[in-house]
Amino acid sequence: MNVLGIETSCDETGIAIYSTGKGIIAESLYSQIELHREYGGVVPELASRDHIRRTLPMIDEILRENDLAANDIDAIAYTAGPGLVGALLVGASVAKSLALAWGVPSIGIHHMEGHLVAALLAEDAPKYPFIALLVSGGHTQLMACHQAHQYELLGESQDDAAGEAFDKAAKMLGLPYPGGPCIAEIAEQGTPGRFKFPRPMTNKPGLDFSFSGLKTFTLNTVNGLKGQSGRDLSSQEKADVAFAFQEAVVDTIRIKCERAMEQTGLDRLILAGGVSANTELRARLDDSARKHHRQVYYPPLHLCTDNGAMIAYAGYLRLQHGHQESLSIDVRPRWPMTELNRD
Ligand code: KG4
Ligand code: ZN
């Protein structure tokens, strides 16, 4: 069975094909980062227009490059939410139209379920049950996953998502969008111990997160360095702030993950979403797993951020479980993942 995956929820057009027994056999990704860079963030209308321009030509190209024809595709999976409504509608409309034309089923996928199953595409994929930490630009959630398609929300961010906090801190340091990889890069030159940022919500019990205070702390630190003259920060100062910021986010996440595992007794942790590409986060969680004799799993690096492969695979898994839907086009810009639970 070959499943075509279409991801258009934000600023990446991702197309991929998952094939039974073979895995991901074709992938193509177009990032709109350059298009949005001058605005310092994603402009929804521009995102939708660009997805419209690219989605069909990319599908045509991926089929041709892999010597596949329309009748080699057995089902189409697309991101149905959460995300930007206009961007989601592009992927959904293309998917449903092709499904009608080709006479195959289509299936709407929850974007965060896509991120989660990307970790199951790794060579040493974990078995259920496990804890999932979903950390992206829009979400920070800890889930207990006892079996496929069943999600128990243990905790989530009360304000900014981890990736969003990276993006905002980067902006304060004059770094381009998306901020996560830029902060991670300059933090490598940072001086450990120069600044000590807070670890929000770690002193009280519970598994929720809050990153907006860290954002304010970063702004105050930056303004303090600028002083009354408002001068620009030196590259060393920027690196030191980036180091302290990243260290605080990573440490906060590590503490909450350890707490979630203690609380549930589960000993496998999987990471997913854009922030799971962060090298420092992976290193600290690896240390923690070794220390506590637990296992931690990550998606292949190129599948941490948005892509079509995770949607194709999530579609395949849902079809295996007999999931079906009609041809009517329905997207969910907001969509709690726990609504996916089977009764
Ligand atoms: O999962 P994703 O591609 O899109 C959403 O679903 O939101 O995540 C994008 C987020 C951005 O906020 C970006 O800054 C962050 O992931 N990110 C990183 C890294 N790579 C991407 N954050 C920290 N370190 C990274 N290496
Ligand atoms: Zn994403």
Image (cartoon, rainbow, N blue to C red):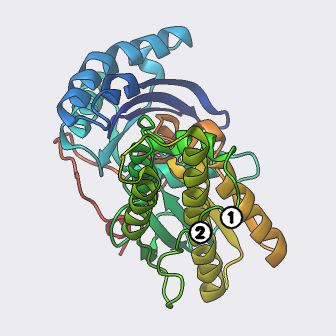
150 shown above or below 32: below
Percent coordinates x, y for residue 318 in the rendering: 45, 52
Q: Secondary structure at mark 1?
A: loop
Percent coordinates x, y for residue 229 in the rendering: 36, 47
Percent coordinates x, y for residue 70 in the rendering: 41, 17
Q: Foreground: 65 or 231?
A: 231
40 shown above or below 269: above
Question: Whole-Å distance between the Cαs marked 1 and 2?
Answer: 6 Å
Image point (54%, 59%), residue name: 245
Circles 1 and 2: CB distance less than 8 Å? yes
Is the residue indicated by label 2 positioned so its CB lies within 8 Å of ligand 1?
no
Q: Is residue 20 visible?
A: no
**Position of residue 1 in the picture relative to residue 54 (left or right):** right
Residue designated by label 2: 196
Question: How many neighbours does mark 2 have within 10 angstroms: few (below 14), some (14-19), or many (20 or more)?
Answer: few
The residue most toward the front is 229
